[in-house]
Structures are given as structure tokens and as C-alpha cells.
Image (cartoon, grey):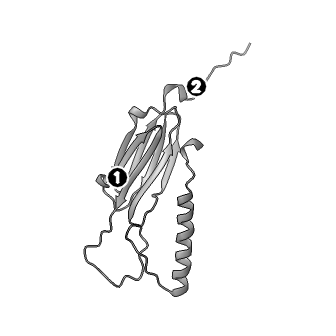
Amino acid sequence: MKSLIKFSPRRELSSLHKTMDELFEDALGFGKRGFIDRSFEPLVDIYEDKDTIELKVELPGMDQKDVKVVIENNVLQIKGEKKFEDEEKHENYHKIERYYGTFSRSFTLPNTIKQEDIKASFEKGLLKLTLPKSEEAKPKTIEIDVK
């Protein structure tokens, strides 16, 4: 299962940057974060059973037309863009915590996944990917004869 999780130095640096921003905002009592060209990484839950691996990706406030799922060279890539949704232009924002901009998450697929049978659904801001395992990858029970 660890072949699905890919180390992301960008994510680690982004987390550090966010923490530093919050420290400065807390010290000043308010903050004004820019939202233009900010990228984010959506949160992903990964679950495995004997037949499938499932990924659930949180994409709140997004439409399925803004998300693209691509498989190339055994790498599953989820990418898209969350656009700033403010119709009115407010100049006096005190704090903007929601992320806007482009995102991309990549996962190396094990060879045991039947890529042609991967299914995706999108409902209420949750992208669900079902990755079926090949028959060879499924656990088998061997009966033991006791004599």
C-alpha cells in the first residue's frame, strides 16, 4: 500500500508556509491573505480491501468540470483549478483562509491495479476513485489438510 503514497516536498513546505502565515496573522490580530495564483493540495483518504483500493478526494466548492483525472506511466494524477468565487469585489477582506488556484496530486499505482476498469464519481465536492485489483493481487485462502 505504501506505493500509493508519494513524498511531496512542496506539500511539506506549503504546510510550513501556512503555519508561519498563521503565526503572523495571530500576532497582528488579523490577516490579509492573497488568493491569486495560490495552489493547494486537496486532502485524500485511501482505503483498501481485498478487491479494490479507493481514493476519496475532498474538493469542496468545486464542480466536476474543474477536475481532471489522468493515468500515465502507472501514475494516477488528479489535477484542476479552484477559482475564486467572489462576484463582488471587496477591498477590505480581513482574512481569507480558503485556498484558490491550481492543484495536482499524483499517486504511483501498483502493477496489480486493472487500470482499464478504474471508475470515478463526483458528488457534493467529493471525488471518489475505485481502483479494482487484478485477480492475481487478491488474497487467496489455501485449505490445510490435517492427517
Q: Which mark is residue 12?
A: none
Three-letter residue code for mark 2:
Lys
Question: Residue visible at 52% across and 32% down?
Answer: 111
Residues at marks 2 and 1, CA–CA distance in whole angstroms = 37 Å
Of the numbered discs 2 and 1, the one sitting upstream in the chain is 1
**Left or right, 70 with reference to 107:** left
Question: Residue visible at 48% across and 57% down?
Answer: 43
- Camera-nearest residue between 18 and 45: 18
Q: State whether residue 9 is above or below residue 108.
A: below
For the C terminus, which image quadrant? top right
Locate residue 143: give its quadrant. top right
- Residues packed near mark 2 inside 10 Å, few (<14), some (14 to 19) or many (20 plus): few
**Circle 2 — which element?**
loop
Residue designated by label 1: 67
For the N terminus, which image quadrant? top right
Three-letter residue code for mark 1:
Val
Outermost residue on the right side: it is: 147
Q: Position of residue 124 (x, y in %)?
A: 34, 56
Q: Position of residue 91 (x, y in %)?
A: 32, 83
- Camera-nearest residue between 1 and 52: 1
- Camera-nearest residue between 107 and 50: 107
Q: State whether residue 87 is above or below residue 107.
A: below
**Left or right, 124 with reference to 143:** left
- Residues packed near mark 1 inside 10 Å, few (<14), some (14 to 19) or many (20 plus): some
Q: Position of residue 88 (x, y in %)?
A: 25, 77
Residue designated by label 2: 140
Q: State whether residue 3 is above or below residue 20.
A: above
Question: Residue visible at 47% across and 43% down?
Answer: 54
Locate residue 34: give its quadrant. bottom left
